[in-house]
Amino acid sequence: MRWYVKLGKVMLSVLIILSPLSLTGCWDREYLKDLHLAYSAGFDVTENGMIKETVELIIPPDIEQKSTTNEIHTSYGHNLRSASNEMRNRVRGNIRFLKNGFQLLGKSVAKQGLYSNLDVNFRDPTNPTSNVRVIIAEGNASDILEQKMVGELKIGDFITQKIESLEEMSVFPKETLDTVFRFLKDPGQDFALPYIAIEGNEIITKGLALFNDQYYSGMTNPDQSILLVLMMGQKGKNARFTKKIDLGYPDNIQEYITINVGLKKVKRKFKVSVSADESVEVNLELKLQAVVEEFPGERLLKEKDLQKINQAFSEILTKEAESVVEEVQKANCDIFGVGRKLIAYHHNVWKEKNWSKDYRKVRFHPKVEIKIVDTGILE
């Protein structure tokens, strides 16, 4: 019996040793040296209706001591897929979007509609979507990507860092291909995307591009964009406002004061109600705790000044919130998801509405309340 057990153990050991030899390996593996990694991609519509695709490819160095370089390539097609196929015919090696940080869409694409240009990303499992930003260019996306370098940064790295920093400053909401695609499928919610442009030799922030359904319909400037992001219930690590406040000093000095409302928790109340005549009312209230970051006056702030500053900032930002609402309604952009509330809680009213026309009739009542909770310049 003992010799039988020992023989079994020997056979098992031999089987374990020899079994890996029968494996065929990874049949679908791809070597990095055979790939071209696309770090950024841009799309435009030409005058004759063709899709123009511009891609930044990162080229690995020949030796370890060298850094990577980038190349900008352009192709054309009758749709996005044919433009991408033409791009692959033009470059050496295959293209993979594994490191793609954003898609830059020219205003021509945004006006024509996003759905057909973004849908291919969700039908191709090799394309990432969860952390890929969608950005709108005022002119052509190709004009921005063809800058190739901004200082010592590759164009893709520069734009990625720019977008991330402005998200932290609450200028842009954090929208990705995933979130945008969900909005495109939602009849009760619109969205806004970062809006950039070339001015001279600089890539500047224009604000937020507003969308009605899948179409570009308007914009907000950077100052309005911060307040809009807060009204949407989002924020980054900082959200600064600089306003001119009259503190009533004897010499009647008008002082500019900078506050930061991103350091503390934002309290937001958003209520949609329907009256007897089926008109829609929206109460949108923000309670913001502020930190004074800059007061360049000749005197130190006093405790008695704080109430005056709170009231002045509250009045100014409430008026600006009303202007923001006017802009989004003029753009027919249901950025706050009023339609989503109607679908959920007033479905019979929603079914009777023609939302593409009735959204502009919604009566908004925005209110912003500021309370200074911290300052290092109190006397």
Image (cartoon, rainbow, N blue to C red):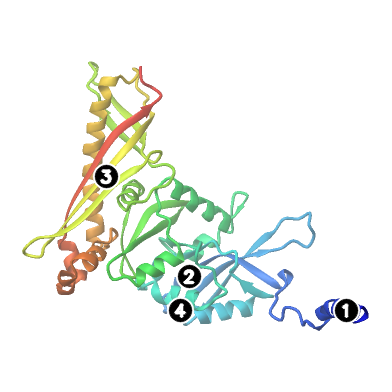
Residue holding disc 4: 50
Q: Quadrant of the C terminus?
A: top left
Residue 360 marker: none
- Frontmost of labels 3 and 2 is 3
Front label number (4 vs 3):
3
Front residue (pair 78, 120):
120
Disc 3 target residue: 286
**Residue 124, percent across and down?**
53, 77
**Looking at the picture, which amino acid does disc 1 mark?**
Val
Mark 2 element type: strand
Q: What element carries label 4?
A: loop
Q: How far apart are marks 1 and 3 (CA)?
A: 77 Å
Quarter occupied by residue 5: bottom right
Decide if residue 320 is on the left or right side of residue 166.
Answer: left
Q: Quick one: label 4, few (<14), some, or many (20+) residues within 10 Å? A: some
In the rendered structure, the answer to whether residue 49 lies left or right of residue 342 reads right
Circles 4 and 3: CB distance less than 8 Å? no
Query: Counting residues from the N terminus, which is met first, the one under dot 1 or under dot 2?
Result: 1
- Taking 259 as reference, is 117 above or below it? below
Question: Is 85 placed left or right of 375 in the picture?
Answer: right
Tell me, for residue 43, which label it has, or none.
2
Q: Are marks 1 and 3 in contact (CB under 8 Å)?
A: no
Residue under label 1, please give it: 5
Q: Residue at x 31, y 51 (%)?
A: 228
The image quadrant that residue 134 belongs to is bottom left
* Residue occupying image coordinates x 48% and y 53%: 163
Between 211 and 186, the residue placed more toward the observer is: 186
Mark 3 burial class by Cα count in 10 Å: few <14, some 14-19, many 20+: many
Residue at 63 percent of width and 49 percent of height: 152
